[in-house]
Image (cartoon, rainbow, N blue to C red):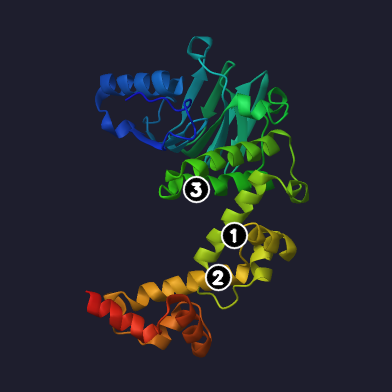
Amino acid sequence: MVISLLGGDALNSPITTTSLASSSASGVTSVDAFRELYGRAVMRLEIDPVPGHPFELDFAIRAVPEFSIASGRLSPTVNRHPVSLIDNEDIVLVWVEQGSGSIRQFGREASISDGGAAFASNAEVGEFRGHSASQLHNFRFSRKMLCDMSVDIESAMARAIPHDNAALGLLTRYASVMDDFEAMASPQLRWAVVTHMHDLASVLLAGIQDIKQLDGRPGVRAAQLRAILDDIKQNLTARDLSPATVAQRHRLSTRTLRDLFKGQSTTFTDYVLEQRLELAHRRLTDHRHAGQTVSAIAFESGFGDISYFNHAFRRRYGLTPSDARVKATSDN
């Protein structure tokens, strides 16, 4: 299948998802046809498997106007972008999550592996060599949007970005929002994600590595907040979940963390409380937890004080935890 990854009205177009897998092709003729379809027509690349390595390509593409992510596995290959296949000026960040490869462009070569990345331009001849079977993510950005952010694009092409670069970590973690299809159904949020991703890309293009230099940028703040919310979700029931511990994990000051929540018209404490109450409510009204006591559910939802839990629950839902359980049973 052939899809358009970019272009159109960013406020009205929904997210597009496409899967491409070489396993759907069998036999030399079918594999060659797949490489023609995927490589030349979709990715605008001449894809040549490295001799001695079976060809494997399995990618999922998620796209909204002006931005897309192609993520998946790729066997050792040589991927050339010749003049004949140049049809746009977009900028691509190649992130090698696992494996190794190299990008050649503008007379330079960048070796990237295991968490490293490098930029490449779709407007120029270039080459990506996969030296091993790799897990790759290609983030595709609008050149126009990046140019509007006043960054020197060409000088940043084919230059290795280390795996521990702070902005790279924020960008790759924030990109998980593209998997949140419910949230991405909002046109305003889709456009916010696009602009935030370009802001983070501009930081990488500018070569900024000091986390302190990133404060205040909209994309950086959005990425930091999402990373913190994901952290809270993963550690919601931990007894040591506090502003200090979370800020330390993300190399932020507690003041910066408080400011991030203030921008969402809430506080860290209120957000954690709301998430724990919602977790407790789901468990109390789920028949699969009918054998658990209210106290057990409260403790397993992150509450250390049953009296405080009862008070907070009643204030939030207008009834006691026991009443909520009874009501759920009668409603069913």
Kind of element beneath mark 1: helix
Kind of element beneath mark 3: helix
Q: Does residue 165 appear in the picture of this structure? A: no
Q: Position of residue 226 (x, y in %)?
A: 57, 54
Tell me the distance, in whole angstroms, between the alpha carbons under discs 1 and 3. Answer: 13 Å
Amino acid type for the residue under numbered disc 3: Val
Residue found 53% across the figure and 59% down from its top:
230
The residue wearing badge 1 is: 228
Amino acid type for the residue under numbered disc 1: Ile
Q: Exactly how many numbered labels are in the figure? A: 3
Quarter of the image with the N terminus in it: top left
Front position in the image: 1 or 35: 1
Q: Does residue 280 appear in the picture of this structure? A: yes
Amino acid type for the residue under numbered disc 2: Val
The furthest residue to the top: 84
Residue 260 sits in which quadrant? bottom right
Residue found 49% across the figure and 38% down from its top:
136
First in residue order: circle 1 vs circle 3:
3
Front position in the image: 238 or 83: 238
In the image, taking residue 138 as reference, residue 106 lies left or right, namely right
The residue wearing badge 3 is: 177
Kind of element beneath mark 2: helix
Q: Where is residue 319 in the image (x, y as percent from the top left)?
A: 40, 82
The residue wearing badge 2 is: 272
Which numbered mark, 1 or 2, is in the foreground of this view? Answer: 2
For label 3, the crowd category at 10 Å Cα-Cα, with few meaning under 14, some 14 to 19 and many 20 or more, is some
